[in-house]
Image (tube, grey):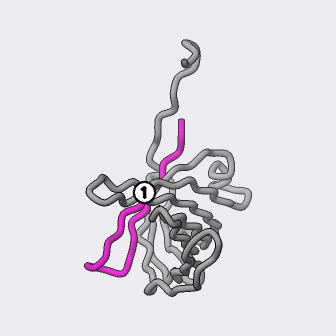
Amino acid sequence: MSSPNVMPPSTEFVYEAIVQIAPREALGRSPLGERFIVPILGGSFEGPRLRGQVLAGGADRQLVRADGVRRLDAFYEMRTDDGTVLTVRNRVLIDDPPGGERYAYSTLEITAPEGPYDWLNRRVLVGTLRNLQPEQMAVCIGVYQLV
């Protein structure tokens, strides 16, 4: 039951990123599932209030659970066109049930220095994830703020 005075959140587009990735490397099984790492090689991002490059050197740590659900935890930096470096942590849940519809959504934390992008420190951000393989070794990440 929802309160008549509380409106559910809506979203506002922040940016879309094309992130180039290396092949996934196996890290072995753990009690929680099979572990992998995907190095981040670079890329670009663009939105109404910011644009720039995804920096190489980050990585996406992946856990494939026994039920097939994948938990991703990506940590990387992006440099805006004016030289500001943003740190991104993107936690994704992917469910690809056999014969079912794919579910791939995330929550993001972006850390920005004081200045024109510090508003990102004060917003709840959610994302979508689309695999661009085999056409290119990349993923497309859509980022939205809750409003």
Q: Quarter holding the N terminus? A: top right
Residue 103 is situated, as x and y percent measured from the top left of the image, at: 39, 54
Q: Does 16 sit above or below residue 139?
A: above
Q: Please give the count of numbered marks on the rendered protein.
A: 1
Residue 23 is situated, as x and y percent measured from the top left of the image, at: 43, 86
Left or right of 51 in this view: 138: left
Left or right of 32 in this view: 101: left
Judge whether residue 44 can be spotted in this image: yes
Left or right of 34 in this view: 131: left
Residue type indicated by callout 1: Ala
| Quadrant of the image occupied by residue 85 | bottom right
Report the predominant secondary structure element of the magenta stretch: strand
Residue at the image position 60 percent from the left and 45 percent from the top = 124
* Observer-nearest of 143 and 33: 33
Secondary-structure class at tag 1: strand
Mark 1 crowd level (few <14, some 14–19, many ≥20, 10 Å Cα): some
Can you name the residue that lies furthest to the right here?
A: 114
* Observer-nearest of 68 and 89: 68
Q: Does 137 sit above or below residue 52?
A: below
> Is 23 a magenta residue?
no
State the residue position of label 1: 104
Residue 132 is situated, as x and y percent measured from the top left of the image, at: 32, 72
Magenta segment? 128-147
* Observer-nearest of 70 and 138: 70
Residue 50 is situated, as x and y percent measured from the top left of the image, at: 51, 59
Residue at the image position 51 percent from the left and 27 percent from the top = 8
> Is 136 a magenta residue?
yes
